[in-house]
Structures are given as C-alpha cells and as structure tokens.
Image: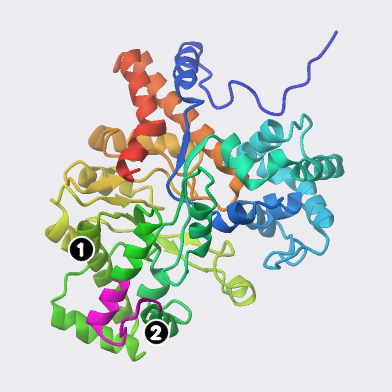
Amino acid sequence: MCITKPALIHDDRLLPADPTMRAIARRLYAEVRNLPIVSPHGHTQASWFVRNEPFPDPAKLFVQPDHYVFRMLYSQGVSLEDLEIGVAELKNPRRVWRIFAEHYFLFRGTPTRIWLDFAFHELFGMEKRLSADTADLYFDAISEKLRTPAFLPRALYERFHLEVLATTDSPLDSLSDHQAVRDSGWKARIIPTFRPDPVVDPEFTGFRENIAQLGELNDEDTGTWSGYLRALQKSRSHFKQLGCTATDHGHPTARTEDLSEQQASKLFDKVIAGCADADEQELFRAQMLTEMARMSLEDGLVMQLHPGSFRNYNRNLYERYGRDIGGDIPTATDYVHALRPLLDRFGNEKNFTLILFTLDETAYSRELAPLAGLYPCLRLGPSWWFHDSPEGMLRFREMVTETGGFYNTVGFNDDTRAFLSIPARHDVARRMDCVWLSRLVAEHRMDESEAREVARDLAYNLVRKAYRL
C-alpha cells in the first residue's frame, strides 16, 4: 500500500470542510488569488530597495524581525540573547536557526505557522517540515537561494506582484532612502507613511529633543505652539512630495479633545517644560489627534489610528532591548466617548478619512461598526495584530458586516516587518474573505456573481480607494 505524504501546504488550506461551501470558496478564490498586492501599512525598510543587496541569512530574514516568532520562543523559555535579538550582525546565524527549528512545533495552529510554511514552500521549494532534523537542510537551501539575483529585494518586490508598498516613518527621518528609490528610475511604488509618535507623545523617549529636531529640520521655532504646528505641516508636505498618502498614530487610547487655541498653547508649554503629569500628557495626545485630523482635511492625507496597545509591557525586555521588542499587550478600548470631540468637528466631512483599528474585539459590533455605519469619514481597518488570524478575520467579518457592511472597511494590510511574509499574509486574508462569502452564497444571502465582485473589492479595490492610491 502506497501512502502519499502530505504536502507542506495544501491547495485547499483554510477553505471550508463543507463540500458545497468549499466549492464556492474555490471559485471565488480563483478570482482574487493573483490580483496585485497593495500593502498600504507596514514596517519594511526603503533602504533594502536602495541597496538591493542579498538578505544575509535565514535567521536574519525570518527570526530577528518577526515579533510573532521570537515572543513565542521567549514564552517557552528561549532567551533573546540566544536568538541574538537586538544585534546588528548575527554572530552565529546557523545556531539561531537551529534553535528556531527545534522549537518550530510551538507554532502549530498559529497564523505564524501558515505564513512561514507558505514562504518555505512557495519561495524556497521546501517539501519537508522544518524541525531539528531539517534545520541545516533549510538553512543551506535558503542561504543558497538568497545569494541569487531572483532573491534580491527588488526582484522579490516584483515576484510578489506588489503594486504599492508603504513603509512607516518618523517626521525626524530625512526620507533620503525614499528619494533614492525614486531617483534610481526603478518602476516601483514604495511610499512613506507619516508616523508622528516621537513628536506628539510626551512619553516617547527623547520627546523634548525630538521637538527641537523637528524645528531644525523644518526651519520653525518649535518652542511655540504655532511654530510646532507649522513644523508638523511642513513635515507632512515633505512626506507627500515623496508619495505619502497616509498618516499613522499609535496612541495608547482613542481619546480625542478639541481645546481652544489658548488652552492648547498653554498645555503645549507645560508639556515642553516637562511639567505635565500623566493626565495632561494624555490630554496632549488627545488634542494632537484632533490637530492631525484638521491637517488631514487640509492636505488630504488619510489618517490611521492604532490605539489600545500597552506598549513595552514587559519592563525587563524594554530596559534591556528598548522599544518594539514584542512586549506589547492589548487593552480594552473605548471609541464612542473617546472619538466624539474629533467627530463633532470633522466626522461629517466627506473629504476626510479616518481608518480605525482595534486590538479590542469586543468593540467591533458594539462601537466600531455602528460608528463606521454612520459617519462619512470613518472606515474600519482589518483584523490587526493578535487578530490577523483565520479565526480573527472571520470574527471581524461576522461582527462588522451586519452593521457596517463591506464598503465601510478597507480591505487588508499586512502591518509586517517580515518582508517575505507579505504574500502569505495577503493570501490568508483573501482565502478567509472567500470563506466568509461562500457562506453567504451557500445560505442564499448573496448571489455568487455579487460575491465575486465583493471578493475583488476586499482584495484590491477597497484598499486603493481608502488610501487614495
């Protein structure tokens, strides 16, 4: 008796077990699987495409930049020192890879496993599962391919069928790499996203020095409220000149305020002097969201709000490795009361777009969908960090669609630092949207012709429209 070993990834992965729905989902997926990828929000680096140099090794490519990977390993007792997290050059990448491979079983049932297996199979042709036994096989095979022209960053951009790739950048960044990409003559659309957290969050490390630097870069006196606002406007204009279409705001909460100019100026003086307490710092962040909304109405940049993450929660990791080393935890988030000052002022503006994200799923049907189903300016971002999973995507559609519909959402974005996971993440999103639509068709709630149209909108059209691409 011949037993066929299962492939690393199955053609019907994630599609429904029910044969009727699976057949519908297959047909819908065939309509969208090869559409171009629009990645409007992520954390890749424009410098990769300027230098266009080979990625150094599998560990640097798959382990070091991916929070999903190393936080899981750390939770099971693997030290970040052994993974060489936070170092510029890995001393022993093969050893790091072997540690990762030995613990690969930890990712069973997670979206990380789906993304990684996709990359291993589709990009590198691997057929056996990653494990301690296959660690060196993987390392050598991947390393060899990374040294070929087909795996240079620009070649991968084209292989992934990327149409737009947005990075996330500080107002203190010169954007010289973005300028270099444009000057190179390479026909790719890699654009910056304006992320002003370092100069609008009083708790950000070096905040006062950052404000001074913002003034120097934009030839404004940022020691005054009016000069500070002008410097931000000039910075946004510089971003727009290099293709930027959106801003991004990673605030602890969704709170907004609408202070008078005199009140705001007084609060700014206190913040700059370093005398603001925690409540006043939160008030300042809230006011700055409203100021950013005003600027977006003026300059047309789409505004994204990513609240509800308790940043750097693991104090030990933060003190040893700094910001953004996977120690962030979701918190409950209020939107109804928090957003009202901003919405009272700008919510009915058709030329202003605010895309809301959440780490608090309880807000989907209770707050976010009803708000987006009412205000012309609001759109709902896709299932975000911790919820960008097959189940999370289905829960999002189930809780949002009944009130907000499909067309008050913005398709999908991958929000990743791991470049090679981009096609895998978009593939998962497209499959899960087809799963949801197949149910509506099977239940005779939607014609299959309508479902095909919606599937294309969710995969491609809505994101281009929402982000003005």
The C terminus is located in which quarter?
top left
User: What x and y, as percent, mark residue 186?
Assistant: 54, 45
Is residue 85 left or right of 415 when viewed as pictured? Answer: right
Residue under label 1: 294
Q: Given contact means CB atoms under 8 Å apart, are the residues at marks 1 and 2 in contact?
A: no
User: What x and y, as percent, mark residue 137?
Assistant: 85, 40
User: What x and y, as percent, mark residue 306?
Assistant: 38, 57
Is residue 159 left or right of 392 when viewed as pictured? Answer: right
Q: Toward the viewer: 50 or 262?
A: 50
Residue under label 2: 212
Q: How many marks?
A: 2
Camera sees residue 443: no
Q: Is residue 88 above or below residue 143?
A: below
User: What x and y, as percent, mark residue 391?
Assistant: 48, 36
**Residue 351 within the segment the image draws in magenta:** no
**Residue 231 within the segment the image draws in magenta:** yes
Q: Which residue is drawn at the image coordinates 39% and 25% (left, top)?
A: 455
In the image, which residues are magenta? 217-232
Camera sees residue 86: yes
Residue 226: quarter of image: bottom left
